[in-house]
């Protein structure tokens, strides 16, 4: 649901609203968040919310009449020496500037927020009694008030791992990747840890939290294999985009409620994996009958 935008709202107003909710000081030191393209004085009537700023989501924002894009993933995470239109990212920058569309990024500062990216993911699974999976270091800008990377909570009812895998696949935005799991299919799961985006750096946190299962994205072969073999929580590996897309609804609602702008939430699947073919059942030769 959108509201009619007001020309008196500026890019600077949107930035201020975002930075009150997701202060840049909460971002990791390696991260690059904030205003990437745009004039703070420019008017904003409609904001497009997307996980990735890519040609497809930019085209969608332009077609939808957006004056500003708020993306989760940084467009310019690493230093560049050119934004010429002959480069992939340069073409995006040029297109935004030519069409007077601002770009703002809220990344790890939105991950750690409460509510933040993992709260929205936990809500898709119906988890209750949430607590942080990985808390910020004491004394850091993001410390306190329930903030932290990931969330741990209880399922609405116990499920086997096999059942939970199907439940998660149905609850998350659809992708070719779907959801795959590691662990015994009949393992009973009551407590689930979640972390939007790449989460195999938090395997030990999921085990320490007493989770029965950990849902995240971008799990790697060896860390996952050793984690399961060591008796850790079962693992559910979803598409990166699918674990972060739920946050966009929360983001858009905040912008509509705090500013007189309308919103466009992108459902374009920007996960790079676009084709999935399940393997056929393995052939097991039967013993001949006597």
Image: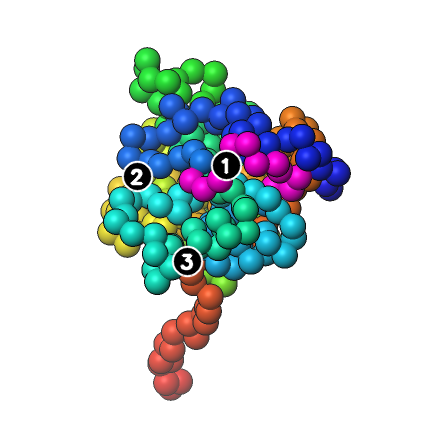
57 to the left or right of 92: right
Answer whether residue 46 is magenta in the image: yes
Q: What secondary structure is marked by label 1?
A: loop
The residue where tag 2 is placed is: 201
Location of residue 41 (image quadrant): top right
14 to the left or right of 285: right
The x and y percentages for residue 97 are 48, 49
Q: What is the C-alpha distance between the residues marked 2 and 1?
A: 37 Å
Label 2 crowd bin: few (<14), some (14–19), many (20+), radius 10 Å = few
221 to the left or right of 267: left
Q: Is residue 86 visible?
A: yes
Q: What is the C-alpha distance between the residues marked 3 and 1?
A: 19 Å
Q: Which mark is residue 39?
A: 1
The x and y percentages for residue 256 are 67, 33
For the N terminus, the quadrant is top right
The residue where tag 3 is placed is: 91
Label 3 crowd bin: few (<14), some (14–19), many (20+), radius 10 Å = some
Residue that appears at 71% across and 37% down: 5
Q: What secondary structure is marked by label 3?
A: helix
């Amino acid at each position: 649901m959108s509201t009619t935008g007001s020309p008196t709202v500026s890019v600077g107003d949107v930035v201020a609203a975002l930075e009150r909710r997701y202060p840049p000081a909460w971002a990791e030191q390696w991260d690059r968040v904030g205003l990437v393209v745009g004039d703070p004085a420019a008017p904003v009537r409609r904001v497009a919310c997307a996980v990735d700023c890519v040609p497809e989501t930019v085209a969608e924002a332009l077609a939808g009449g957006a004056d500003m894009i708020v993306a989760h993933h940084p467009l310019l995470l690493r230093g560049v020496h050119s934004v010429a239109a002959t480069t992939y990212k340069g073409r995006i920058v040029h297109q935004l500037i030519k069409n007077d569309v601002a770009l703002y990024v809220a990344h790890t500062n939105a991950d750690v927020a409460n509510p933040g990216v993992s709260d929205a993911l936990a809500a898709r699974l119906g988890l209750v009694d949430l607590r942080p999976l990985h808390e910020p270091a004491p004394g850091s800008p993001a410390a306190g008030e329930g903030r932290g990377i990931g969330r741990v909570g209880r399922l609405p009812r116990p499920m086997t791992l096999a059942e939970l895998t199907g439940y998660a696949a149905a609850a998350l935005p659809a992708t070719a990747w779907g959801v795959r799991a590691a662990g015994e299919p009949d393992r009973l799961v009551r407590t689930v840890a979640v972390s939007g985006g790449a989460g195999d750096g938090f395997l030990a946190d999921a085990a320490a939290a007493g989770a029965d299962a950990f849902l995240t994205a971008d799990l790697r072969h060896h860390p996952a294999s050793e984690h399961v073999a060591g008796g850790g929580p079962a693992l559910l590996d979803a598409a990166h985009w699918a674990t972060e897309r739920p946050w966009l609804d929360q983001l858009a609602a905040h912008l509509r409620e705090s500013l007189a702008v309308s919103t466009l939430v992108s459902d374009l699947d920007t996960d790079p994996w676009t084709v999935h073919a399940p393997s056929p059942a393995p052939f097991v030769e039967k013993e001949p009958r006597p």
